[in-house]
Amino acid sequence: MGGCFSKPKPVELKIEVVLPEKDRGKEELSAGGKGSPRAYQGNGTARHFHAEERLPAPHPYPGAQDCLEAAVCHIKDLENGQMREVELGWGKVLLVKDNGEFHALGHKCPHYGAPLVKGVLSRGRVRCPWHGACFNISTGDLEDFPGLDSLHKFQVKIEKEKVYVRASKQALQLQRRTKVMATCISPSAGHSSSTNVLIVGAGAAGLVCAETLRQEGFSDRIVLCTLDRHLPYDRPKLSKSLDAQLEQLALRPKEFFRAQGIEVLTEAQVVTVDVRNKKAVFKDGFKLEYSKLLLAPGSSPKTLSCKGKDVENVFTIRTPEDANRVVRLARGRNAVVVGAGFLGMEVAAYLTEKAHSVSVVELEETPFRRFLGERVGRALMKMFESNRVKFYMQTEVSELRAQEGKLKEVVLKSSKVLRADVCVVGIGAVPATGFLRQSGIGLDSRGFIPVNKMMQTNVPGVFAAGDAVTFPLAWRNNRKVNIPHWQMAHAQGRVAAQNMLAQEAEISTVPYLWTAMFSKSLRYAGYGEGFDDVIIQGDLDELKFVAFYTKGDEVISVASMNYDPIVSKVAEVLASGRTIRKREVELFVLHSKTGDMSWLTGKGS
């Protein structure tokens, strides 16, 4: 079985835009996949395996009548390093001029639809201005995360000093391209107790690992198992949009997993891993042998340990059902949020228009203090206060009081009593790695799984990714860190898959995260732990600012609001290996009225 992991011949079709029409658009089609839906038997209980639906028939290749070609500009209309959105009948296209060559791509980031023309062009790729995803301008391929899909690449030709773009109607309207994936040639019939790849955890890390294996030509069995009732979904959206429905949250439709031969076991809990015999044992006694294993179990939220901790209507938001119930219970009633970190503050912001009152309880003096510093934290706190949120800082919960079993009051250590019909607890999380304690897979003192740059654990053939790992952060001198960001989980899942296929990839992505509150987005890149100074440019009261976090004479992270695309610019500079010095930032702040950011990119303004 192990022999399946020699490096396969890649099957991804690099569709060059000069191909004849009949061959174009193949990357839009899902690889077909037959096989019957089945439920796994484990000690007599049926396992939930989502494979009910047949794939829709594939679209025919676009014929000549589905394509459009038009002149979009003169060759001198764009300078080198410039991007422009151009109209092409059925939609817009991003036109890029780089090193004298023109490239035409989809104009929106497939992740959340950001206009890429406002992003950053550097080193042959364009970086999304909102969340930092990067796309290769020659192929349209996604090269850094978040997100799952790539951009369409369109044909460009120059005639009589005019730039012509040719594109299919379907590609213009879809604005996303799912990479070609290998079809599974060893469906599970007959050997359902063994798999080539077992992935424990179906968050971003687990899903990206499975997709990357298929993109790289791996055609053996992949089983993805999750404690959740649902197929992989966008968990960061839960706290930003509490009444989002499952269809809006799903990362891939059911048919996708069927087509790619990625088997998903839901409500499936691994209780032990036997590394000597390469076997995972599930709670219901079902045993599954593997050849390669990815551990991406994520984390478990911390809960309150005070008196009355078991009363009803107290939530840690982990599932769409939790989030939906919180909104229902809060409507027109009193909501209390414990913890002023990202989850707590996002929930508080969302509930202000729904609840009668929203109160936030926090041990620190200001929200986000350790992460964003005192001044930025205070500015964000003011924004919340102007939206009727009441803060109770430097205190904690001493008791939850119930009436007929349901929450009625939250009592604070300061003796203040808050009326509460629903309470959301966001006080941090711990790695969900208890099941690995006796396995021989290394855990550190806090329960995190240490990995190297290749996402390899101390056990050969066992990889780990996502919120439960510590890994060496390349541009912070390989310091071992835990970064529980959505984007980082994607990147780690990909690197793990590449190394299962012996490709010797290393994790090098620059951490990037975002939060949205009251229709305002805060973006953040880098790793700011241990910052000793913050240099702020802009106006904190107006919530239009950029904050540079420095340690010694080096910038280690940056946060901004209403200042795009500076966070993506900084991320791109850090990704290129360049150090940003504190004095450069101080000069920028001094001369910022000119808006000159050339010091960041090394180009004239």
Image (cartoon, grey):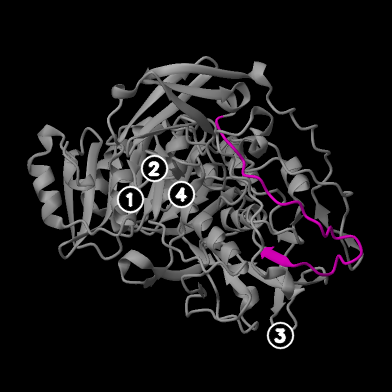
Magenta span: predominant SS is: loop
Question: Type of residue at label 2?
Answer: Arg
Task: State the separation of the CA atoms marked 4 and 3.
Answer: 39 Å
Say whether disc 4 or disc 3 marks the residue closer to the N-terminus.
Answer: 3
Closer to the camera, 354 or 166?
166
Disc 3 marks a residue whose amino acid type is: Arg
Q: Residue at x 62, y 48 (%)?
A: 319
Q: How far across and how far down the image is residue 67, in percent?
A: 61, 20
Disc 1 designates what residue? 571
Q: Quadrant of residue 590?
A: top left
Which residue has dot 2 on it? Answer: 127
Cβ atoms under marks 1 and 3 closer than 8 Å = no
Q: Which residue is mark 3?
A: 276
The residue nearer to you, when weighing 308 against 161, is 161
Q: Quadrant of the N terminus?
A: bottom right
CB under 8 Å between discs 2 and 1: yes
At label 1, counting other C-alpha atoms closer than 10 Å, the crowd grade (few under 14, some 14-19, many 20 or more) is many
| Rendering quarter of residue 10 | bottom right
Q: Is residue 430 above or below residue 376?
A: below
